[in-house]
Image (cartoon, grey):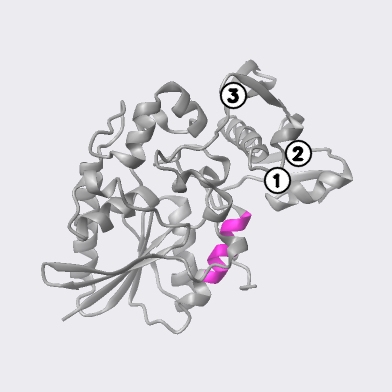
């Protein structure tokens, strides 16, 4: 009996948006990610699913909800499907990682057989546990159809392995966009990739990859920011945004009893509108979470309200606020 398993990369999460390394750090889906999930749900409308799995991280659980909730199925968490553990890289910006060790940065995407970082898994370990996870899903759903939400690097490693590639060869393959779908067919010990990394359900304006360049570059590099902290204490943080060795902006926040108030948010004009500004927001989000704050607040000119609204801020009492709580929100209707 043939068993079908749909594999789905999670929707856009904060690490994707803020250009921060999130392996097993438990980040959440962005507003854009929820719009992607509406399209994913529509793609699977009418598709029979007997079970829905996912890694036990919030971003995959939320992604899987687009499939299990409409069918009144339970969610089946499976830690074997987690993203690669990144060790000391976790929560560092990709710009900082490249500045710290460019060769290892390139190895992560292009030479995974050589990649090794303190406290991290190896790609061979990821490959082995992902294969174990798929075999378990197949055994539990013999002759049926299941879906499983997982992560970019983990899925790329699994799919390349199932296509007969070595880790070195996998480093020369492409990447799947957020919510990209792949399909496996399993007959006994035989696991076939029917198709992979299909994101045709996403319109161009909802594609994460359309806004990014790293996946197109031979070395998988991109101009990323790193941050030089000027002050960090019990009252807040003040940091300079750096592009290579040039100061290009500033982000500062003051801790309030229940929120982090953004007091400075600056980027030099030549870099505006090019995806750098949101990396400043990522620093504020990470700092707020690290200090137990569930809300970001700021006061901004009216002409910038649309910019911040795009990333989840809403007007509140003459200010704008962003809720950081880790909740599975209702997925909106497809546009």
The residue to which callout 2 is attached is 297
Mark 1 in CB contact with mark 2 (< 8 angstroms):
yes
Residue at the spot x=74%, y=46% of the render? 308
Q: How far is disc 1 from disc 3 in space, using C-alphas?
A: 22 Å
Residue 184 picture location, percent across and down:
26, 69
Give percent across and percent down for residue 172: 30, 48
Q: Position of residue 26 (x, y in %)?
A: 46, 44
Q: Which residues are magenta?
A: 31-39
Picture quarter with the N terminus: bottom left
Q: Which mark is residue 322?
A: 1
**Residue 227 - label:** 3
Task: Find the residue positioned furthest to the left.
Answer: 189
Q: Residues within 10 Å of mark 1 (few under 14, many from 20)?
A: many
- The secondary structure type at the circle numbered 3 is strand
Residue 37 belongs to the span the image colors magenta:
yes
> Which residue is found at the position 44% from the left and 43% from the top?
217
What secondary structure prevails in the magenta region? helix
Work out whether 326 lies above or below 104.
Answer: below
């Amino acid at each position: 009996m043939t068993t079908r398993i749909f594999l789905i990369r999670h929707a856009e999460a904060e690490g994707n948006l803020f250009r921060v390394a999130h392996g097993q750090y438990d980040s959440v889906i962005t507003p854009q990610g929820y719009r992607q999930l509406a399209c994913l749900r529509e793609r699977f409308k009418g598709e029979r699913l007997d079970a829905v799995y996912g890694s036990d991280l919030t971003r995959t659980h939320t992604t899987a909800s687009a499939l299990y909730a409409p069918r009144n199925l339970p969610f089946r968490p499976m830690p074997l499907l987690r993203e690669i553990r990144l060790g000391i890289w976790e929560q560092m910006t990709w710009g900082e990682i490249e500045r710290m060790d460019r060769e290892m940065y390139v190895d992560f995407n292009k030479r995974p057989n050589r990649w090794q970082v303190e406290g991290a898994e190896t790609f061979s370990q990821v490959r082995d546990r992902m294969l174990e996870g798929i075999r378990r899903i197949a055994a539990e759903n013999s002759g049926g159809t299941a879906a499983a939400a997982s992560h970019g690097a983990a899925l790329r490693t699994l799919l390349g392995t199932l296509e007969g590639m070595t880790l070195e060869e996998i480093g020369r393959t492409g990447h799947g966009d957020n919510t990209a779908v792949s399909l496996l067919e399993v007959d006994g010990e035989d696991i076939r990739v029917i198709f992979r990394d299909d994101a045709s359900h996403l319109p161009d304006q909802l594609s994460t990859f359309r806004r990014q360049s790293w996946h197109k570059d031979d070395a998988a590099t991109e101009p990323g920011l790193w941050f030089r902290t000027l002050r960090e204490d019990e009252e807040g943080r003040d940091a300079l945004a750096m592009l290579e060795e040039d100061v290009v902006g500033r982000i500062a926040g003051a801790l309030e009893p229940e929120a982090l108030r953004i007091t400075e948010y600056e980027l030099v004009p030549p870099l505006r509108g090019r995806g750098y500004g949101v990396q400043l927001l990522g620093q504020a989000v990470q700092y707020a979470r690290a200090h137990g704050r569930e809300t970001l607040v700021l006061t901004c000119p009216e002409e910038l309200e649309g910019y911040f609204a795009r990333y989840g801020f809403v007007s509140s009492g003459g200010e704008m606020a962003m809720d950081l709580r880790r909740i599975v929100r209702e997925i909106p209707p497809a546009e």
